[in-house]
Image: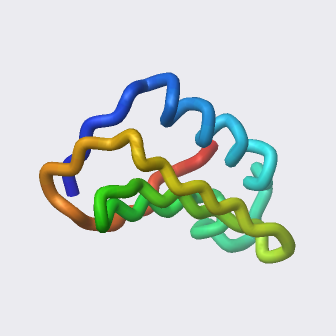
Amino acid sequence: MQFVIKRDVLLKSLTLVQGIIEKKNTLPILSNVLLNVKNGKLEIIATDLDLVFYDELSAVKISTEGSTTTSAT
């Protein structure tokens, strides 16, 4: 997965994710955020099993499609 996006655009979504992610989870995967790059868009998904955050950013230049999770804390 490889993409280019403006820092401010990505940071806005990741700041909103911080409100969803709890710091003290018993399931480590719930401390992560899913980044999915496909069809010319970046999807950012996070959950705490009660709430789901979903954002779709189209201001992205994609070189290679793919998915990964990364720590949201």
- Position of residue 33 measured from the top left corner of the image (x, y, whole percent): 55, 57
Image coloring type: rainbow
At 33% across and 66% down in the image, what residue appears?
A: 67
Comparing 31 with 10, the one in front is 10
Q: Is residue 15 left or right of residue 25?
A: left
Pick the front one: 62 or 20: 62
**From the viewer's perspective, is 30 left or right of 59?**
right
Q: Nearer the viewer, residue 8 or 23?
A: 8
Position of 38 with respect to 56 (left or right) is left
Residue at the image position 68 percent from the left and 47 percent from the top = 17
Q: Quadrant of the N terminus?
A: bottom left
Please report the residue visible at 39 percent of the width from the left and 40 percent of the height from the top: 59
Count of marks placed on residues: 0
Whether residue 44 sits left or right of residue 30 in the image: it is left
Quarter holding the C terminus is: top right
- Look at the picture and state if 62 lies above or below 34: above
Farthest-out residue, left: 63
Instruction: Determine which quarter of the picture holds residue 47.
Output: bottom right
Q: Position of residue 34 (x, y in %)?
A: 49, 62
